[in-house]
Amino acid sequence: MGGSHLADWPENDYRLFCGDLGNEVNDDVLSKAFSRFPSFNMARVVRDKRTGKTKGYGFVSFANPADLAALKEMNGKYVGNRPIKLRKSKWQERTDYEAREKQKNQAQKKLKFPRKSILHK
């Protein structure tokens, strides 16, 4: 299992959560939208590990908390085909809880029904 894909993110950075991303928004598109902020580190669109499809949200990382002003400046601005929703990302969110919970649930299901085809949804 490849561990958390956020492992290569800077420690102790300041992060914005970007929601409402269209399917056409990839890491590059998101990076370009925020690259003019001086302490911009990187941007990452979260994708479904199996299908590679975007989950419609991502994160933008800054080295300097002053650049969290990007929240006010960029919230509701068009990135790709639709306006993005921004909020401060809590530090704890860096380990994508939602994904973990899903993995846990799927693991439990697999244990209970090893041979049923219900799994292939």
Image (tube, helix red, strand yellow):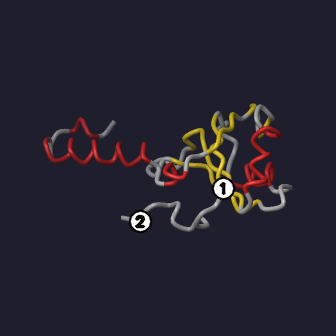
Query: Which of disc 2 and disc 1 is earlier in sequence?
Result: 2
Q: Nearer the viewer, residue 13 or 59?
A: 13
Residue at x 41% of width, y 64% of height: 3
Q: Residues within 10 Å of mark 1 (few under 14, many from 20)?
A: many
Residue at x 62% of width, y 49% of height: 45
Q: Nearer the viewer, residue 86 or 1?
A: 86
The answer to the question of whether label 1 and label 2 lie on touching residues, with beta carbons closer than 8 A, is no
Q: What SS does tag 2 mark? A: loop
What amino acid does circle 2 point to?
A: Gly
Quadrant in which residue 23 is drawn: top right
Q: Which residue is mark 2?
A: 2
Left or right, 108 with reference to 66: left
Q: Nearer the viewer, residue 28 or 105?
A: 105
Residue 35 in picture, x, y percent from top left: 81, 56
What amino acid does circle 1 point to?
A: Tyr
Residue at x 67% of width, y 36% of height: 22
Residue 4 in picture, x, y percent from top left: 45, 61
Left or right, 108 with reference to 67: left
What is the spatial separation of the Cα atoms under label 1 and label 2, in whole angstroms?
24 Å
Residue 80 in picture, x, y percent from top left: 76, 39
Left or right, 56 with reference to 78: left
Checking the image for residue 14, the label placed there is: 1
Total label count?
A: 2
**Quadrant location, the N terminus:** bottom left
**Quadrant location, the C terminus:** top left
Left or right, 42 with reference to 1: right
- Closest to the camera, between mark 1 and mark 2, is 1
Residue 40 in picture, x, y percent from top left: 76, 60
Q: What SS does tag 1 mark? A: strand
Residue at x 86% of width, y 55% of height: 36
Checking the image for residue 116, the label placed there is: none
